[in-house]
DNA sequence: TTGAAAGCGCTAACAC
DNA sequence: GTGTTAGCGCTTTCAA
């Protein structure tokens, strides 16, 4: 069995309390005792039992992360990177990360309820906020700590990080207009997602600002997967007078759109321009490399972990709400519209 | 504060012991008491404190999973799916999953040591076994429970699941030969990985069986990423008399190879054939869709969780070592070699 | 059929 | 400076 604080106490001939305090560097312990205790701890390879510490502290030192996926599986590179971001920062801060995947809906919400009721985690990180977000409503009402990646439609009085999608999409559309595009297709995310509004708004605004009009028939929505982008792009490219540029609201859908175009024999970046959002690692190595908006996914994950941990420990957040600005990464998936 | 067993005891006017036993359905409790206790538990929304249970049981009910990545980030769809598989099965079995990402090497091993010494997890799931695997050596010597996805070079006397890579690659090569290919390029995984040997062996064997020879200059190794596949394929396609078929040892590298070929103006499936391994979800929607070997990644994750949990609970494993057979998924990335 | 008491490993209030 | 005592919430002897 592993050595406990008791074993050390025995060894150095002191009480358990003294050992505990020596180890935790209380200043009412004599330097000699401290030293002896520490020495013994090292020799005996002592490690505190996190289990006992947690019970006593009434804290799990664990962050909960319920990944919303369609079906139980997940293979979204965006989330992989995000996960690594929160996980690694959490580890650095001495917290564990408890992950599970749920399909949005009742089942998902009950996962939150369970974790809360069983006090299994100290707080949550929420992603892909919805316009009206059950998870947030619930956690607020339960008065349970959480931070979110994203805002909600109203009352976003909670700590969050978000990117300025509106601004980002503005950059993309501006760029496409500068290239000469006049007719846009949009592959939007599901409408209940908050960032869907922002991204669409950004697109519309810039188009109108340029004195152009966005044909609402060329705005389709899909599920953020490659397959979804593929299917919707087939539709967009199949209409009589198809768009010369397709703005996809994430990289995965953009990849799907590229496949659809290529299948039709089109050259992406020449016959049609396609853009994404996120700049996942694959975006650099697709064919052609994808023009997209960069967000520091890994870093955002880290920020959220840090914020949540501070929240749990009742420390001050320097910034309770932060909004990041994505940057436009120009690669080869866009070009001037084909002459015709 | 949440209700405890004590609160219930008070409410029903029984001792804490009785309540505990009633809740755990001991049969030395009168049916009436049991009923009253249960009723009270429901009304008071009682949930046992996992923290307390764990301390008492001296078990963390947690599975450890240290994801080997190059650098702290990860965005490999293979692992995403795998992770979902182990995570969801673990949840069903009442276990938490503790994830972190580490770069293989000393830092990684010390993560294992820490988890073991702090008794933070009850056991580990190990992936991407190496020919000589530190992690396995360590866990064996520490006598700590683990299961692995993959074998090691010698002495694989431990519970594992593995796919028969040799067999799988045989299917691929057979298929390519049937299409008429005679000159193969191979993008192999890092040589220290165990499955690297198996896959190469499978390739070599089938080629030789057909009375052909594998040009060792056309066997390159890469790091399992898309970028890596891209770079190596550029080399393979740049030699004077390039291969007509490129066998990549995972899907990501195959995608990279496709990009490289396309960048050269080649049509994949016509000017050059390319195959992968894993059948990640994206393989179906690349352009062209990728011919590859299917492994049930999600399911394998689930199997491993289940095996590990049984191990931890000292239950019998029906099968301690299982080897799966991948199946060939034919899509459009291969065709007959170009006439010349 | 039930309850008192001990203990899992640790921290902390309070005395000395 | 240090030790005694209690307690975190639960399970499990053991005795009644």
Image (tube, coloured by chain):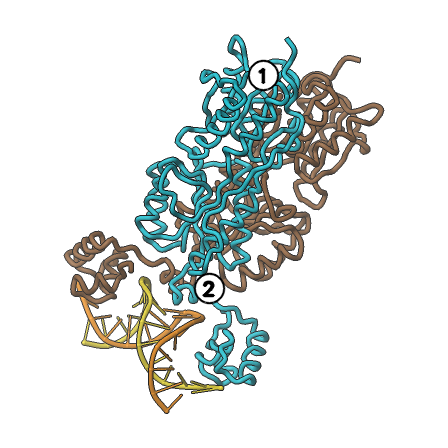
Chain colours: A cyan, B brown, C orange, D yellow
- Name the residue nearer the viewer: D9 or B173: D9
Q: Which quadrant is home to the N terminus of chain B?
A: bottom left
Q: Could you say where residue A226 lies in the image, as x and y percent from the top left?
A: 53, 27
Chain for numbered disc 1: A
Q: Residues within 10 Å of mark 1 (few under 14, many from 20)?
A: many
B270 in relation to A193, above or below: above
Q: Secondary structure at mark 2?
A: helix
Q: Residue B230 occupies which quadrant of the picture?
A: top right
Q: Could you say where residue B302 lies in the image, as x and y percent from the top left?
A: 47, 42
Q: Could you say where residue B69 lies in the image, as x and y percent from the top left?
A: 62, 46
Q: Does residue B318 show up?
A: no
Q: Which residue is mark 1?
A: A244
Q: Which quadrant is home to the C terminus of chain B?
A: top right
C-alpha separation, residue under disc 1 versus residue under disc 2 = 59 Å
Q: Residues within 10 Å of mark 2 (few under 14, many from 20)?
A: some
- Name the residue nearer the viewer: B269 or A25: A25
- Look at discs 1 and 2 and give the one toward the viewer: 1
Q: Could you say where residue C2 lies in the image, as x and y percent from the top left?
A: 18, 66
Which residue is farthest right?
B240
- For the point 62% across and 45% down, which residue is it? B128
Q: Residue B270 occupies which quadrant of the picture?
A: top right
Q: Earlier in the sequence, mark 1 or mark 2?
A: 2
- For the point 45% across and 31% down, which residue is it? A196
- The answer to whether residue B287 is left or right of residue A193 is right
Chain for numbered disc 2: A
- Name the residue nearer the viewer: B173 or B280: B280
Which residue is farthest left?
B32
Q: Residue C12 occupies which quadrant of the picture?
A: bottom left
Q: Does residue B142 show up?
A: yes
Q: Which mark is residue A50?
A: 2
């Amino acid at each position: 069995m592993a050595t406990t604080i008791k074993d050390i106490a025995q060894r150095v001939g002191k009480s358990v309390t003294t050992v505990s305090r020596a180890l935790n560097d209380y200043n009412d312990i004599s330097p000699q005792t401290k030293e002896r205790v520490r020495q013994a701890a090292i020799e005996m390879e002592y490690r505190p039992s996190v289990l006992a510490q947690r019970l006593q502290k009434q804290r799990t030192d664990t962050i909960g992360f319920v990944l919303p996926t369609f079906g139980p599986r997940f293979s979204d590179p965006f989330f992989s990177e995000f996960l690594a971001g929160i996980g690694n920062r959490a580890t650095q801060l001495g917290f564990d990360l408890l992950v599970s995947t749920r399909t949005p809906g009742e089942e998902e919400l009950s996962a939150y309820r369970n974790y809360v009721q069983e006090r299994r985690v100290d707080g949550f990180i929420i992603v892909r906020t919805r316009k009206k977000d059950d998870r947030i409503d619930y956690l607020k009402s339960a008065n349970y700590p959480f931070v979110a990646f994203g805002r909600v439609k109203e009352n976003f009085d909670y700590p969050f990080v978000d990117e300025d999608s509106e601004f980002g999409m503005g950059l993309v559309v501006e760029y496409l207009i500068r290239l000469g595009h006049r007719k846009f297709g949009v592959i939007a995310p599901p409408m209940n997602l908050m960032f869907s509004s922002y991204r669409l708004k950004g697109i519309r605004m810039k188009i109108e600002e340029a004195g152009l009009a966005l044909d609402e028939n060329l705005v389709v929505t899909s599920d953020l997967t490659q397959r979804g982008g593929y299917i919707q792009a087939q539709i967009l490219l199949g209409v009589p007078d198809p768009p010369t540029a397709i703005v996809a609201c994430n990289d995965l859908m953009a990849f799907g759109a590229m496949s659809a175009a290529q299948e039709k024999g089109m050259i992406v970046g020449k016959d049609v321009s396609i853009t994404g959002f996120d700049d996942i690692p694959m975006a650099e190595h697709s064919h052609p490399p994808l023009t997209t908006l960069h967000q520091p996914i890994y870093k955002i994950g880290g920020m959220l972990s840090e914020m949540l941990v501070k929240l749990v420990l009742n420390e001050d957040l320097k910034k309770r709400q932060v909004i990041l600005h994505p940057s436009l990464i120009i690669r080869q998936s866009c070009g001037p519209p084909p002459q015709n």
